[in-house]
Amino acid sequence: MYIHIGEDINIRARDIISILDKESAKNSPLVEEFLKSHKGKVINLTKNPFKSVIVTYDNIYLSPISSGTLKKRSNQMSIHEF
């Protein structure tokens, strides 16, 4: 199934490695270092400050959608798969 993460971008749920909230991403030196080292793969989907970071096998997305909302969407997808 696919999850809408903002700006008309849908990604496959099975490709998602991690979804981080804004506070975790901004307060963790490890996440900050990770984002800097993968700067070429970061795709910003928002004009405003991002609300979540979605890490996939191919890219890292800065999303305007909160991590809680993305979690709810992924749970709804799981229910509808069966």
Image: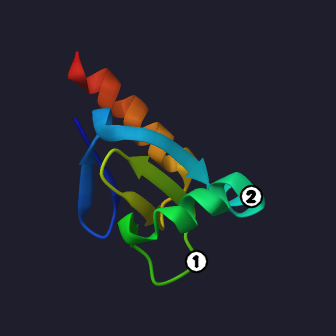
Relative to residue 23, is residue 40 depicted above or below? below
- The one nearer the camera, 44 or 65, is 44
The residue lying at 71 percent from left, 64 percent from top is: 26
Write the residue at 38% across / 70% down: 40
Density class for disc 2 (Cα within 10 Å; few <14, some 14-19, many ≥20) is few
**Quick one: label 2 or label 1, which is nearer the N terminus?**
2
Quarter of the rendering occupied by the C terminus:
top left
Residue drawn at the location 45% of the way across and 52% of the way down: 54
Q: Position of residue 72 (x, y in %)?
A: 47, 38
Is 47 left or right of 67, judged from the image as shown?
left
Look at the numbered disc 2 and give the secondary structure of its residue.
helix
The N terminus lies in quadrant:
top left
Q: Position of residue 55 (x, y in %)?
A: 44, 49
Vertically, is 50 above or below 65?
below
Count of marks, rendered view:
2
The disc placed on residue 49 is 1
Q: Are marks 2 and 1 in contact (CB under 8 Å)?
A: no
Kindly identify the amino acid type of the residue bearing the numbered disc 1. Pro
Foreground disc of the pair 2, 1? 2
Q: Residues within 10 Å of mark 1 (few under 14, many from 20)?
A: few
The one nearer the camera, 80 or 60, is 60
User: Does dot 1 land on a helix, a strand or a loop?
Assistant: loop
21 on left or right of 62: right
Give amino acid for label 2: Pro
Q: Quadrant of residue 43?
A: bottom left
Identify residue for label 2.
Answer: 29
- CA separation in Å, label 2 and label 1: 18 Å
* Depicted 69 relative to depicted 23: above or below: above
